[in-house]
Image: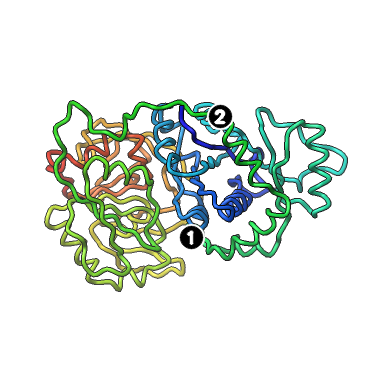
């Protein structure tokens, strides 16, 4: 058995005060902030293979969020990825929504104690909501005052027979400052400290750590992080990953797997660098290039380097914002059309009304270096990037209505679908297959 302290944390409500459904921020940030102050190294896990609106875990813990997903992954893969990410830390915090059947399944797969976030502002004066099932503890959010914290704690612990581990009051100034942050940003630690200060008034970290340590974790047999015994040694591979304040949305397990399978992973900045590292594959993750369009188009050397990489037969894989960067033009929030790399005959614009990611399962209509025709792909479509062709933009998918969700030209593959390759290891193995790279998508 393994000693892996762990806890699941999330709200039971789908939304707050008529707002769209959100995760348990900022109370989860307050918990991580307070644990960090007490010297506890936390690894944050997101219970879906999608990117959260804010990367606060990175700011607080120094570790990027990792991802688990019962729709995308099997039980064995979830368990192995959890062990891989949690082993070197003091506590794993798995965040999700308890009204989701997928999160409940994940809690069962990982045997997670459940810490439910309750929006206290919804409590009527003389009545309580129905007690949630299968809970090990409560966190109270949006409590009106310190006096109400202690009143609700006494009431809930006596009527629901479940401990209250902590609380967060309204904090209108701090919440307003956090709400003003642009989506996809990494909040500064200074903005998060007031959450920890307030949580410290009502929270005892040692109680949470004791809950997280109650259950041992069965050992898992590694399957992902090894070379298949029937395979030949992989070809040497260098993957250049775009990483800066614009492009930073990646699944850590994908990058870990590339390295553990023998690839050399190097990073570069489309904003700052003038030279592209020598590489076999350029990997452009999601982000928000529309916010730095002038700086990106002004880096003429990098634009030329990427074009030359494509002209010489080099492979490129891009998602979301990376797809937009490869288009001929990008439309900025103020309506200007700015030139980008230009290897895809299209114009990209970010929707002014962002929508949540959508789970999709699609089929490759033709062979690409990522897989043969008929290969099934699973991931979450980012509906916020709108792609408008200005030429013969080649779709790689069979299903009608998904024409611009995966497009290609030459050795460039660009997708609106975020794919966690740790859940689809055969596609990750395609990065190492030069024979597949011989397949091109010409226009």
State whether residue 17 appears in this view.
no
Of residue 370 and residue 201, the one placed in the foreground of this image is 201
**Image spot of residue 2 (x, y percent):** 46, 31
- As drawn, the label of residue 123 is none
Of residue 168 and residue 127, the one placed in the foreground of this image is 168
Residue located beneath label 1 in the image: 185
**Image spot of residue 205 (x, y percent):** 64, 46
**Image spot of residue 367 (x, y percent):** 19, 37
User: Which residue is pictured at 43% across the width and 32% down the height?
Assistant: 78
Q: Which of the marked residues, 1 or 2, is nearer the chain's N terminus? A: 1
- The image quadrant of residue 208 is top right
Label 1 or label 2, whichever lies nearer to me, is 2
User: Which residue is pictured at 32% across the width and 68% down the height?
Assistant: 271
Q: Is residue 395 above or below residue 361?
A: below
**Image spot of residue 118 (x, y percent):** 70, 42
Residue located beneath label 2 in the image: 215
């Amino acid at each position: 058995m393994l000693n892996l302290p762990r806890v699941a944390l999330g709200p039971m409500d789908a939304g707050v005060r008529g707002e769209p459904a959100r995760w348990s921020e900022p109370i989860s940030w307050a918990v991580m902030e307070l644990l960090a102050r007490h010297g506890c190294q936390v690894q944050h896990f997101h219970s879906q293979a999608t990117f959260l609106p804010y990367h606060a875990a990175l700011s607080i813990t120094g570790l990027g969020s990792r991802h688990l997903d019962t729709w995308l992954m099997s039980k064995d893969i979830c368990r192995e990825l959890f062990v891989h990410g949690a082993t070197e830390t003091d506590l794993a915090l798995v965040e999700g929504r308890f009204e989701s059947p997928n999160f409940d399944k994940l809690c069962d797969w990982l045997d997670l104690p459940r810490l439910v976030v309750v929006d206290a502002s919804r409590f009527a004066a003389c009545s309580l909501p129905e007690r949630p099932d299968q809970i090990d503890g409560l966190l109270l959010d949006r409590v009106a005052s310190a006096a109400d914290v202690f009143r609700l704690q006494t009431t809930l612990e006596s009527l629901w027979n479940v401990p209250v581990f902590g609380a967060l009051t309204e904090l209108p100034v701090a919440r307003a400052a956090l709400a003003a942050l642009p989506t996809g940003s990494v909040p500064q630690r200074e903005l998060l400290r007031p959450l920890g200060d307030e949580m410290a008034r009502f929270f005892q970290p040692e109680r949470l750590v004791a809950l997280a340590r109650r259950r041992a974790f069965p050992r898992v047999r590694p399957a992902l992080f090894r070379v298949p015994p029937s395979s030949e040694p992989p070809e040497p591979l260098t993957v250049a990953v775009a990483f800066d304040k614009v492009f930073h949305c990646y699944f850590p397990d994908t990058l870990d797997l590339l390295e553990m399978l023998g690839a050399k992973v190097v990073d570069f900045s489309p904003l700052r660098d003038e030279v592209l590292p020598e590489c076999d594959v350029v990997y452009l993750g999601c982000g928000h290039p529309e916010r730095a369009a002038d700086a990106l188009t002004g880096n003429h050397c990098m634009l030329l380097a990427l074009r030359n990489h494509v002209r010489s037969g080099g492979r490129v894989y891009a998602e979301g914002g990376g797809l937009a960067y490869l288009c001929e033009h990008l439309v900025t929030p103020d309506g200007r059309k700015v030139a980008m790399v230009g290897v895809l005959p299209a114009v990209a614009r970010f929707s002014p009304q962002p929508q949540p990611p959508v789970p999709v399962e699609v089929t490759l209509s033709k062979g690409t270096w990522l897989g043969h025709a008929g290969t099934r792909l699973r991931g979450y479509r980012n509906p916020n990037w709108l792609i408008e062709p200005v030429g013969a933009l080649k779709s790689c998918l069979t299903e009608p209505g998904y024409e611009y969700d995966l497009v290609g030209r030459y050795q460039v593959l660009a997708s609106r679908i975020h794919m966690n390759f740790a859940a689809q290891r055969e596609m990750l193995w395609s990065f190492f297959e030069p024979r597949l790279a011989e397949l091109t998508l010409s226009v």
